[in-house]
């Protein structure tokens, strides 16, 4: 079945550092890929998505590129802020009929001033 | 506009008691999902409702779990005879799905209900 593997956290960075959170997936066909973010005390929010190979999703300075050849969707940001501290979830969903979201285990990011 | 709301935000119960968790989806959203977020298990799909179709219950972990969606809007997740392993955050999401069978619309999540079973 479909699955998502993402790097374990916590990831601890200083403000303005470069961020990479790795995500790889296993799926049949051509799934859609997502990054969700959960800020402290809040619900999950969609951060960005990509629906086909080589698409780049971007939002709030974060980017991720759908790489089918490496089955990856790594999240990057060039300069993190304290306000980016949150838990980040990589997820996929198949594109035939109803397909539930399949999530990775989440990576906690802690950014210090 | 109003997002997905869930109640209660926190629920503490004793082992063996029944609990009901409520979800109010975004008005007009046709699809509603329940997920569970627990330590060691990550985020797990539980059940999905779409319009008047039969729900997809494939993620429910046992027959102690059930869910209803009344009038195509509000949903209630019921856990009977709660066990300590049921302790988790229960998340509800809704989306506006098309009728073409190509389900790609964004799922909007509520803040969750944190359930603690003592």
Image (spheres, coloured by chain):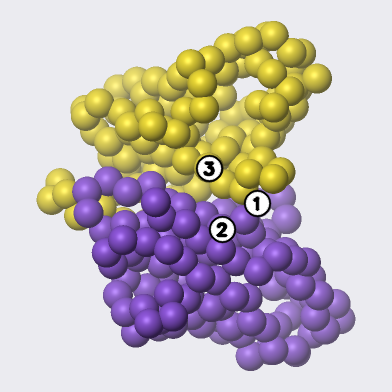
Crowding near pointer 2: few (<14 within 10 Å), some, many (20+)?
many
Crowding near pointer 3: few (<14 within 10 Å), some, many (20+)?
many
Q: Looking at the image, can residue B73 be seen?
A: no
Q: Which residue does the numbered mark 3 point to in the structure image?
A: B44
Label 1, label 3: how many angstroms apart (C-alpha)? Answer: 18 Å
**Rendered residue at 47%/28% (across/down):** B60
Q: Looking at the image, can residue B84 be seen?
A: yes
Element type where label 3 sits in the image: strand
What chain is colored purple?
A
Work out whether mark 1 precedes mark 2 in sequence or the reverse, and give the earlier one.
1
Left or right of B17? Residue B74 is left
Left or right of A58? Residue A23 is right
B19, A10: nearer the viewer: A10
Numbered-mark total:
3
Q: Which residue does the numbered mark 2 point to in the structure image?
A: A104
The residue marked by circle 1 belongs to what chain?
A
**Rendered residue at 61%/16% (across/down):** B19
Element type where label 1 sits in the image: loop
Label 1, label 2: how many angstroms apart (C-alpha)? Answer: 18 Å
Residue B55 % position (x, y): 31, 28
| In the depicted structure, whether residue A54 falls above or below residue B72 | below
Left or right of A73? Residue B95 is left
Mark 1 or 2: the one toward you: 2
Q: Which residue does the numbered mark 1 point to in the structure image?
A: A42
Residue A53 % position (x, y): 32, 79
> Quick check: do tags 2 and 3 share a chain?
no
What chain is colored yellow?
B
**Rendered residue at 37%/61% (across/down):** A27
| In the depicted structure, whether residue A68 falls above or below residue B95 | below
Label 2, label 3: how many angstroms apart (C-alpha)? Answer: 10 Å
């Amino acid at each position: 079945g479909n699955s998502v593997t993402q790097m374990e956290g916590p990831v601890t960075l200083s403000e303005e550092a470069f961020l990479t959170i790795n995500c790889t997936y296993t799926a049949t066909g051509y799934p859609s890929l997502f990054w969700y973010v959960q800020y402290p005390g809040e619900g999950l929010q969609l951060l960005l998505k990509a629906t086909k190979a080589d698409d780049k999703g971007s939002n709030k300075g974060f980017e991720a590129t759908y790489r089918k050849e490496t089955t990856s969707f790594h999240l990057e940001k060039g300069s993190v802020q304290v306000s980016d501290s949150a838990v980040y979830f990589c997820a996929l969903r198949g594109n035939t009929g109803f397909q539930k979201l399949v999530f990775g285990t989440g990576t906690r990011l802690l950014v210090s001033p | 506009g109003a997002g997905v709301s869930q109640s209660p935000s926190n629920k503490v119960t004793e082992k063996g008691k029944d609990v009901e968790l409520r979800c109010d989806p975004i008005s007009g959203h046709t699809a509603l999902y329940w997920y569970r977020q627990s330590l060691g298990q990550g985020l797990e799909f539980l059940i999905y409702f779409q319009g008047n179709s039969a729900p997809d219950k494939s993620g429910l972990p046992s027959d102690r779990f059930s869910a209803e969606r009344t009038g195509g809007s509000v949903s209630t997740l019921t856990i009977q005879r709660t066990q300590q392993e049921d302790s988790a955050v229960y998340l509800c999401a809704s989306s506006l799905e098309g009728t073409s069978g190509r389900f790609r619309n964004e799922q909007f999540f509520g803040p969750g209900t944190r359930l603690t079973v003592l």
